[in-house]
Amino acid sequence: MAKYVFLDTETTGLDPHKGNHRIIDLACVEYEDSTPTGHVFNLKINPEGKKSVKSAFRVHGILDEELEGKPTFSDIHQQFIEFIKDRHLVIFNAAFDLRFLNAELNRVNYPSTVSDICAEVTCAMELAKSKFGVRKISQDAACLRYNIDISSRTKHSALLDASLCAELFFKLLDDSVEPLESTPQQNKHTPTKAISIPRAFKNKETGLYTQLNFCKNPECKNFGVVAKNPTYKANGELKRGLGNEYKLTWSDDKSEHLLTCKLCGHSTTMIHNRCFELEVKRLSTIYEPVEPTCQNKAIPGQPKTFRPYYIPTSPENRRGIKKFKPRCKNRDKGIYTHPELYKLDGKAQPDRIIERVVKKPTRKGGKPVTQIIKEEKLGSQLLTCHACNSKLTVKLNPANRHYRDADNVKIFKELMNKDILNRMMEKHELGAKVIYDKINFFYEQALAFDHYHSQMIDHAVATRTLSLSSDRQFYLSNWGDHNMPKPTPIVNTSTVDNHSGFVFVSDVNFDFTSDYQEINKEHREKKSRKSSLITDATRNTY
Ligand SMILES: [Zn+2]
Ligand SMILES: [Zn+2]
């Protein structure tokens, strides 16, 4: 004959130490072998002002107000100790309950712990885990494997859980009862789940949050006011609708939810803030010029990225022992932004002056004039990385050793004039890949140009008063129609920094909404009336 005491608690939270959480429901049920003796210790306990956290409340459903006027743990601890003294205590997930009980005993300055008071403590969860051969199991899942009915319970209470624990414990001890091999699926009543507003994204560098789910109508009061998630009622149920003046609606094809403003009715798609930030970051790196860096970019697990070097064993065998250079800490640090990390180490290729013979066309019949033009071609600079002592070369002239670099200017102009790629390949006798490589090259050069001038203007703005020049120029542009006889004047106004050449603004003063057919019609009417050539429509655009 063995006597057991089955124990369970409900608490205000998960941690008795960090969160200072308390026991609010305590139940001990005594069994003799597998029959209850009817001896029960079950009490609600006043947590002395500590409130249940939301997640804990959803488990036990005990309101904070219910516990007012109940005895505190110090009132009942003598009775409790009497009940469990020298008994065999069985708890599901004993570690959790013991931590709380010992914390409570410590609070009332009781000198010993629960394990000292009892004769023995058994964890039913550990027993179930070893029996089922799993690493994790809940009390519900363990009960389901033994066909123990748990459907009557929607909320956890200490007494019910302790009785279920007893039923489970005797099944676990009884080797004649075979448990199911896996936990059966149960059609539990699932409460309606709210669709939540995507979480705000915290930028780790700046500490700022991004939350883009708000009304996008700039004239609305809700503009920039972030939508809030639905709130819970006192009994743990979800309130209908969102937390503030927004509602969720379906898109036309019912494929996604839209955030609709209750004030102005404006709908926007929901934005995943993290994805948005990552995409902005990705796009901004496209416009970052790529700087040359130390080449020892060894990536662990990718042998091809390791640069080898050789230690000669004899004058004949210069490639004696092959070794790999380790990853360098300067691998992400560019030579322009971190010049102190690199050392200039002479020229890998010297500067040269080359002479080119240029034939200038003359009028028909005359001899062509030939002229010798001297051009300076910059070589390549050799640099040494201070950290790993390896060398890298940087072209001083970007077009140096560039395939067919003499054609670069022509191809660039043709691209600007929206020439057809097939025609360009034919004309220059180049493959498509070369043309595309050149497009990439032009793009990189344009970025470098822009980057250089932006840096110049940053410096200029910081250090001195700016000297700016503004100018305007008139262009005459033809409509893309031969029947339109009149060229349209366009004014271009530009403002440029004199020192760096940085263009602040270059604006074409042209009304894009004007319709050339209407202008044409007006022009013909006026022409028939033999009036001024400049139409009112074009004059309005100034
Ligand atoms: Zn609105
Ligand atoms: Zn290095």
Image (cartoon, rainbow, N blue to C red):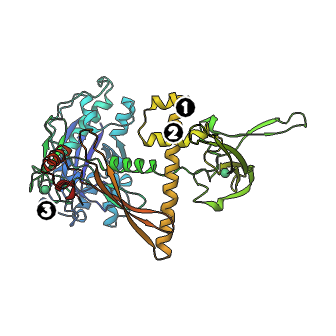
Give the residue type at disc 2. Answer: Ile
Q: Regarding mark 1 in the picture, which secondary structure is present there?
A: helix
Give the residue displayed 15% in from the left and 35% down from the top.
254
Q: Regarding mark 3 in the picture, which secondary structure is present there?
A: loop
Tell whether label 3 touches label 2 (CB within 8 Å).
Answer: no
Does the rendering let one see residue 19? yes
Give the residue type at disc 1. Answer: His
> x and y percent of residue 98 in the render?
34, 52
Give the residue displayed 90% in from the left and 37% down from the top.
314
Gap in angstroms between the C-alphas marked 2 and 1: 9 Å
Does the rendering let one see residue 16? no
From this view, report whether residue 142 is shown above or below residue 459.
Answer: above
Q: Quadrant of the N terminus?
A: top left
Q: Disc 3, ligand 1: is the CB inside 8 Å?
A: yes
Tell whether label 1 touches label 2 (CB within 8 Å).
Answer: yes
Of residues 189 and 383, the one nearer the viewer is 383
Give the mark nearer the N terminus: 2 vs 1. Answer: 2
The residue that label 1 is drawn on is 428
Circle 3 Cα neighbour tier, 10 Å, few/some/many (<14 / 14–19 / ≥20): few
